[in-house]
Image (cartoon, coloured by chain):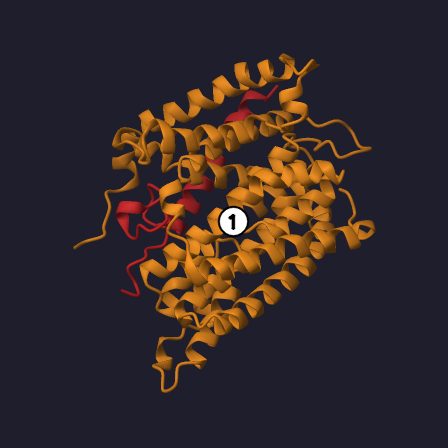
């Protein structure tokens, strides 16, 4: 049976209804629901819904997406809306590329050095921990390999990228993804509360979730849920640099786990291993190049002043870029919510779930501890 | 079975075209699509702010 799907442009008209639902949802949230929550008096306090629950348009958007799929449409996105929701990752990636306008090269160097140190350490430690626990729980090597990269880098993409290299079955990938998404959804919703309770700064919070949360979309959602502002130095600007560093490490981690997998197979067909060079070409996330071009253009002043603290205010172009970004992220995250399927999350179970929870929780807590220890060395941009 | 999970098939438990979380053929095509959309959006914003 062929897996070929119709081309993008042939499917695009069928995406309009889903896209319209996403846009209408976000417009209603931002123009009516969020302002109402800010002014409504609950328990005698004006704005209680926002001050205490910390709900904002990002979390509301995700919740709406989840409600559409799991409550209103009974667990499956109707065919008519399905293709529109398939554009959600495109929107998230577009927003991340546009985020490049928040940084200059000097800020990237400052933040990037710290990010490489933290991300690199956590990726290596997580892989080692998963490979060891995989042995302890006597997991299938393919399953362990997929989990190692899913838990160490950026969840879904890493699991999918690793699967062919370690001969993983669809069920291995399904288990890994269900485990990390289930854990990620939990952390996505509780992290803003923890961050506010611990009175973390945007820098500390961004560094923590950029390291500790497993999935790219959830890092973005959690950062914007903590502080919905998109500007230099806000949680999203810090978390995304961390995330970009992590995404870049996908080919290297796939290579390391592939070498481990084939090294452990006695008399294996070593020819199936791919070189690091081949993996770099095949797996490098090219949207990162778009992000770097945006950083370059911003550093060159192509869009005017970026509005860094202490400097001149942001130009009108930069202001508009940031406003549009918040909308594009909002649309993308309604779509992301529409991909959270409670029934499918129940697929996670047994030893892979135990391993995922142990490693995920360790990473999440350890990242917070490390960030709190090194907080004086985290330089604001 | 090893290759029945296509890149871009990110919906849980559903390998291949049926469960794809993207309209593009794979992640790389989606990345390029995101770059093109960004170019269009940025061009519109720059044009709107030209004095």
Taking A277 as reference, is A322 above or below it? above
Which quarter of the figure has residue A33?
top right
Is A326 located above or below residue B23 in the figure?
A: above
What residue is drawn where x is 33% and y is 59%? A171
Q: Nearer the viewer, residue A261 or A19?
A: A261
Counting from the top left corner in percent of width and height, residue A45 is at 70, 15
Relative to A247, is A190 above or below? above
- Quarter of the image with the C terminus of chain A is top right
Q: Residue at x 60, y 66 (%)?
A: A124
Q: Is residue B41 visible?
A: no
Chain A image colour = orange
Quadrant of the drawing holding the N terminus of chain A: bottom left
The residue at which mark 1 appears reads as A183
- Neighbour class for label 1 at 10 Å: few (<14), some, many (≥20)? many
Chain B colour?
Answer: red
Dividing the picture into quadrants, the one containing residue A43 is top right
Residue A281, horizontal then vertical, whole percent? 44, 62
Residue A280 falls left or right of residue A319: left
Task: Provide the secondary structure element on which disc 1 rests.
Answer: helix
Image check: A73 left or right of A186?
left
Which residue is found at the position 68% from the left and 24% from the top? A51
């Amino acid at each position: 049976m062929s897996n070929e799907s119709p081309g993008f442009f042939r499917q695009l008209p069928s995406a309009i209804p889903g896209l319209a639902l996403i846009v209408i949802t976000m417009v209603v949230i931002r123009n009516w629901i969020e302002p109402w929550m800010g002014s409504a008096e609950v328990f005698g306090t004006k704005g209680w819904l926002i001050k205490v629950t910390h709900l904002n348009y990002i979390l509301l958007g995700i919740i709406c997406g989840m409600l559409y799929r799991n409550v209103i449409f009974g667990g499956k996105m109707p065919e008519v809306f399905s293709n529109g929701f398939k554009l959600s990752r495109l929107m998230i990636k577009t927003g991340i590329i546009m985020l490049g306008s928040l940084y200059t090269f000097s800020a990237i160097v400052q933040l990037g050095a710290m990010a490489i140190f933290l991300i690199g350490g956590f990726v290596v430690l997580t892989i080692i921990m998963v490979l060891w626990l995989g042995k302890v729980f006597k997991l299938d090597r393919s399953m362990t390999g997929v989990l190692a990269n899913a838990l160490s880098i950026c969840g879904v993409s890493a699991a999918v990228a690793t699967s062919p290299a370690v001969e993983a079955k669809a069920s291995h990938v399904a288990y890994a993804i269900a485990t990390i998404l289930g854990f990620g959804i939990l952390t996505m919703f509780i992290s803003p509360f923890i961050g506010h309770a611990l009175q973390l700064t945007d820098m500390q919070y961004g560094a923590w979730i950029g390291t500790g949360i497993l999935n790219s979309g959830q890092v973005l959602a959690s950062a914007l849920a903590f502080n919905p502002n998109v500007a230099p130095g806000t949680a999203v600007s810090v978390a995304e640099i961390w995330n970009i560093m992590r995404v870049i490490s996908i080919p290297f981690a796939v290579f390391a786990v592939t070498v481990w997998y084939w090294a452990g197979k006695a008399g294996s067909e070593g020819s199936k291993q791919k070189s690091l060079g081949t993996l770099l070409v095949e797996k490098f996330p090219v949207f990162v190049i778009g992000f770097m071009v945006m950083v370059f253009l911003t550093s060159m002043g192509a869009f005017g002043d970026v509005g860094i603290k202490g400097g001149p205010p942001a130009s009108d172009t930069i202001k508009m870029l940031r406003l549009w970004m918040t909308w594009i992220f909002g649309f993308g995250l309604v779509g992301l919510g529409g991909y959270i399927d409670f029934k499918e999350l129940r697929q996670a179970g047994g030893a892979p779930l135990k391993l995922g929870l142990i490693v995920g929780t360790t990473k999440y807590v350890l990242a917070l501890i490390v960030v709190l220890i090194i907080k004086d060395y985290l330089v604001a941009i | 079975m090893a290759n029945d999970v296509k890149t871009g098939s990110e919906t849980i438990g559903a390998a291949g075209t049926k469960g794809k979380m993207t309209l593009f053929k794979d992640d790389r095509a989606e990345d390029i699509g995101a770059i093109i959309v960004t170019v269009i959006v940025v061009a519109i914003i720059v044009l709107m702010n030209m004095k």
